[in-house]
Every structure is written in C-alpha cells, then in structure tokens.
Image: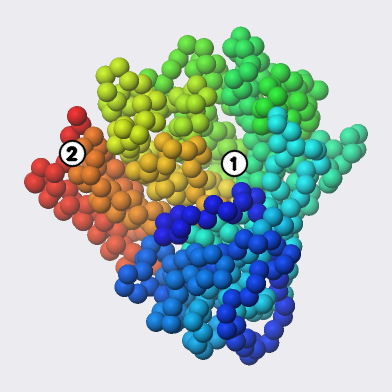
Amino acid sequence: VRGVPDVSPISTSPTLLLMSKQVAPSHRIAPHAGPSQPNPRMGAQAFNIGIVGQNEGQDKSGPDNSSMRVAPHGKSPNIGPKSPPLSAAQQQAIHDLTGFSLSQDTSGKDGLGSIRVHHGSNGTYVEHWGLEEIVWHSHSIAFDIAAQQSERQPSQSNPAQPSPKDMAAEALLTSLFAGQLSECTALLKYAMSATHSDPDIMHTSLNTVASEGCLNHTRDMCYYFLNKTSRSFARVIQELDAELRHPVCIFYLVLRGLDTVEDDMTISLDKKLDVLSSFHQMLYQRGWCFTGCGPDERDRELCDKFYVVVDEFLGLKPEYQKIIAEITKRMADGMAEFRSNKRVITIDDYNLYTHYVAGLVGLGLTGLFAASNLESLALSSETKLANDMGLFLQKVNIMKDFKEDWEEGRWFWPQEIWELYVLPGQDLGAFLEEGNLDRGLACLNHLCADALDLVPSCLEYLGMLKNESVFKFAAIPQVMAIASISLFFNNPVIFKRAGLKIRRGLAVKLILGCTSMESVKDIYRGYIRELVLANDSRVGSNPFDESFMRVGRALSKATQWLHRHDLTHGDKAGKKRRQWGDSVIAVFGIVFSIVLALGCLPRAK
C-alpha cells in the first residue's frame, strides 16, 4: 500500500468490533495523556494509524487530503508536537467516517486525529486515539462482526470460506490502512443499506432456504448459489426491477455453470466437448445436472444441483428462455472451438474469444432488457455496442488473471502482441522472470491500450439506457473495469501475484456513485485523468514500451466522447468540466509533439 508500512500481522479474514454510544452533539471528550493498553479481549498485537497533516516531507499520496502512518502499539505513529492540527477537511473526513467531532485542544504529544487498531487472535478493535469508544453523531450503531464458523468442517479440498461479515471487516481495514476515508464511509453506508435487502433473494446461507419439496425451494437455492458465486453481483441484481431480476439471475447461473465445465481442467477434453455441445438442450431437461466436476472446483455444488436452475429456467417466460438458450449455445460452441483446435494467436482471435465468453453476455442481457419492455426494442439492434461492453470487461479480466492462467496451463494474451516483447525462442511465461519485467510491462500497457479503445462504445451504450435499475446494473461493472485498468496500467504486480483487484472499499464507493449518466461520466473523467498522468510520467522509462501513442489516442477518444455528450445532452457541472476535457486533448497533443520532436519515444529492441 502506497505510503503505508507493511502491516502483515493483519490476518486475511479479521473480525471487527466497532463500539458506539449516543452522545449529545456538544459533548467533548479530551484525549488521553498517552496510549491505553490494548483491549484485553483482543490479544496483544496492535497498531496505531495516524491521520496526519500534509506538510513538507510527509507523504502526499493519499487522495483524501491525509496520509497514514503505522507504528507499533504504544508508540506515536510519526505524529509529534510540531505536527500541524488537522485541517477542517481532515476533521470533516473523520467525522464522515466515525460521526464524532474532534476536540480542538492540540495538547498531548500524540496529537489529534489518530485511530488505534487493536488486532489479535480474538478479533480487531478500532478506536480513536484518546477515545474509549467510537461515537456516532446521529445514531448509535453497534457492529458485532464476529468470525462465523462454517457449518462444515474445513478440509483441504473444501476450505471454509470467509463469511460476509469477515469480508466486510477486512475491506474496512484495508481501506483504512490505505488512507481512503471516503471508502470507509462508503463501506459503512453499503453495510447499513444491506439491512433493507429483499429477504426473498438474499439467501446467503442454507438456513434461509425453503426445505426441499416446498414451493420456493428451487428459487431460494438459485439465489443461494447467486450469493455464493458472486456476492457483489447478487447485490447489483437485487436493484433490478422485479420483471428482470429473476431472468437475469437464471441467465447468470446458466452461464456460470457452463463456464465451470469449460474451466475445469480435470474433465477430459472429449467429455468436456460433449457436455458443452448439449448444454443448451439440457436446460429443457427437467432434473438434469452435471456431477463430473473435480473435487476442488469452486462451483462444483452449483453443477451438482443444477436441476434447481433448470426448474427455474423452465418457469421463465418463453421469450426469456429463447434468449438464454440461444446465447448458451453460441457461447458453448465458441468455448468448444477454442478448447479443441483454436488458440489466441492473432488480435482477431483475441476479439473472437472475448466475444464468445463475454460479448455474447452483453448481447443476451441486451435482449433481456428489450424483451422486458423496460428498455426500447431498438436497443436489441445495437449489437456492436453490446458486444463491446462485454469485450471491455473480459479483456480487463484477462489482464488480471495472467499469472493464474499461465500457472494452470492457459493463456489468453494474443501472441500477435506478446511476441513483440519477448526474446526469440521465449514464450509468454518469460514475463514472469524478473529480468524480463520491462518487457512484460510493455506488453501489459499495449493490452491496456487495446481495451481502452472500447471505452467510447461502452459510454455510448450506457447513454442509451432509460431505466434506472438497468442503467445501474450495466454501469457498475464498467466503472469497476476502468478503475481496474487504472490499477493494472504499468503495474508489475500483475506478474508477481495472481488476482490483483481494486480494493473492496473502492468497489463499493463506485457502486454507490453510479446514480446517473453524469455521475458515471465523472468517474470516467477521474480515471482518464489518472491514466493520462501515468502515461505521460513513464515516457522514456522503458526501452521496450511503444504504447505511449496507443494509450494517448485511446484516452483522447474517450475524452472527446465525453465532451460531445456534454454538448449534446447538457452538463450539470457546467463549463469548467468541458474546458478540462478540451485541456486533456490539447495537453496530450502538445506533449506528443514535443516528445516526437525530441525523438524521445522509445523503440523496441
């Protein structure tokens, strides 16, 4: 984490206890003279996280006008008597997170505005430095996020999964350590909004599922599997209008089952091809399931009990069934083609593969949107835009999963691109070698540019949507994808560990931010700005990287789209934002001209 020392003692599934009480707004609590001992319930390890002012010599990387310092418990986290008092903006940020107002008394060597985190084997306790309890401004909320033991004993082949509460606690701490107070606020808002979730679909455990043989058993099981396979998707689907909610859920589970079969490397190729070719037909065979997945396959239970999905599929309207079955067949045919004799060699192969596994999802969802009458029937004719929506998401996933895919014997980066950056006789795995990191980054940035070319199509599609719930459903994955590209761009971590993702707190912040086309455009503008700066700052730093122009052109086209949309649809933020968009294009042109004139563009060797 930038600007924060290693905090490895924090476990991967911590528990969190936030204690609160109601206090009158005028109540003031003075800071302790020194640090208190860790909560005896919580074990011995503790860290003090100081939120300090930004003066000369201090880290300025935090976007929330504050930076984080970590020190062992009992020591000041780099906050001395000469540190400036917290600014009004910083105090407001802490108030937004915790709900309490800080005393203006700056006495005490440890200063104001630090947060103490006690962590141990029994849990984690978070408190403000000098406060014995977290005080919420308007109401009292007690979060008791205790570790939930799995109903089954964990085993090597079927390890216990962290509970939603454990994951929420981990996400809050991760954002806290990163200094992202706005993400902490978003996480708390998101957690509180979950209490209003529809109980009919939020089946996060089997305890809430109707017994087998009861009327709602198969429906409940489908939402149990939805929550189990993708909690974030389950929350997004809950926001859809009732007309679309169930068809989209079943569509997701059908394709998840298909993907599980295609992805399971323990299934023989002949068996896999046979199942893929008939999968769409089995949707009409009541009681059908697939029990041939390997013991370590994550979604094996879904395939073992796929008959519940089939039952619910057969209960959908015929027009929904037709769309789902057709997309399933086309996707299975494409998967079989690439599994049997086709590889991702050319860029055309790359686009074809991502069409099969994700572009078709965009086409299917678009068909469901139109069939529901929540969107115009004309939307279903926008096949290129719908396809590009899926391609953008899948290309981001392919970048993210590079290391994991390679280690499991798969590769989806197109050879036409990666062979530009490896030495003769080397394959894609060369990027995992430390000596080839610059070559790997050059290839990664090339792929980022290829994905960014799709941004205008994605924005165009989102701009056509009229129904609020459909818009949010479509927009949320897209803003997460552009945030992910900003994280992946020129990032060596892609080659060092599998599954690099944006923080869960950031993901929640993006979810809450997708309220309108204007807010989505703002999100895109922010990440375009980040990428422009990152692209400019690396010029000449990598002798193998020629993607500066590709990335710049893609970002320029995206900015031009935003500018045109502002002019034709109005811009609630006014003239200032449009001027910024023009500035990005102008600055890029000037920078490129200077770089070109000086001959600074690197050449591949």
Neighbour class for label 2 at 10 Å: few (<14), some, many (≥20)?
some
Q: Residue at x 41, y 79 (%)?
A: 83
Where disc 2 sits, the SS reads loop
Q: From mark 2 to mark 1, how far is it between C-alphas?
A: 46 Å
Instruction: Check disc 1 and give the amino acid type.
Output: Phe
The label nearer to you, 2 versus 1, is 2
Q: Residue at x 62, y 45 (%)?
A: 233
Q: Position of residue 534 (x, y in %)?
A: 30, 51
Compared to residue 315, the image places residue 338 above or below, namely: above
Neighbour class for label 1 at 10 Å: few (<14), some, many (≥20)?
many
In the image, taking residue 542 as reference, residue 21 lies left or right, namely right
Camera-side residue of 391 and 56: 56
Q: Quadrant of residue 23?
A: bottom right
Residue 602 - label: 2
Name the residue beneath numbered marker 1. 369
Q: Residue at x 64, y 16 (%)?
A: 267
- Give the position of the N terminus as an image quadrant: bottom left
Mark closer to the chain start, 2 or 1: 1
Q: Position of residue 514 (x, y in %)?
A: 52, 56
Compared to residue 55, the image places residue 303 above or below, namely: above
Q: Residue at x 70, y 62 (%)?
A: 42
Evaluate whether residue 18 shows in this view. no
In the image, taking residue 281 as reference, residue 7 lies left or right, namely left
Residue 314 - label: none
